[in-house]
Image (cartoon, rainbow, N blue to C red):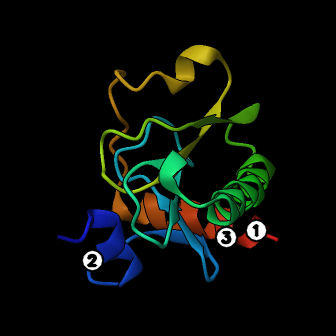
Amino acid sequence: MASIFTKIINREIPAFVVAENEHCIAFLDIKPLAKGHTLVVSKKEVDYIFDLDSTLLNELMQFSKRVAKAIDACKFAKRTGVAVIGLEVPHAHVHLVPINGISDIEFSKPKLELSKDELSEIAVQISSCFI
């Protein structure tokens, strides 16, 4: 069965996409820890990030770096933190979270409730800074 991320990649369900290439896609987390919290996902559905072949793992990390730089340019926080948890959705992905301190990337914290308009605006901001 396809993961929720595969359904987003296939445009079967909507997402606030900020960047995409042939191997990866980046979209906003709809239950973010912070404004700008973005997921970077391999288009190939592989459960565990370290089961990606080396080329695709490198592509995912290089793409994540470009997305993080776009998030940084938006000045949501001091910098963009990165986390790979790998348990919540069985599809390799990276969390990019704007942070001002280490506690800002604590996944047990309550998530923000942002409107679709707010998410859309944030997605446009990040997308416009993506190079």
Identity, as a three-letter code, of the amino acid under mark 2: Ile
How far apart, in angstroms, are the residues tagged by discs 1 and 2?
23 Å
Q: Is residue 25 visible?
A: yes
- At mark 2, the secondary structure is loop
Task: Give the residue number, with chain letter if any, for mark 2.
Answer: 13
Q: Residue at x 79, y 52 (%)?
A: 69
Task: Give the residue number, with chain letter if any, for mark 1.
Answer: 130
Front residue of this view, candidates 125 and 83: 83
Identity, as a three-letter code, of the amino acid under mark 3: Ser
How far apart, in angstroms, are the residues tagged by discs 3 and 1?
5 Å
Contact flag, marks 3 and 1 (Cβ < 8 Å): yes
Mark 1 or 2, nearer chain start: 2
In this rendering, is residue 103 above or below 128?
above
Q: Residue at x 60, y 76 (%)?
A: 23
Dot 1, crowdedness within 10 Å: few (<14), some or many (≥20)? some
Task: Give the residue number, with chain letter if any, for mark 3.
Answer: 127
Contact flag, marks 3 and 2 (Cβ < 8 Å): no
Q: Residue at x 76, y 58 (%)?
A: 62
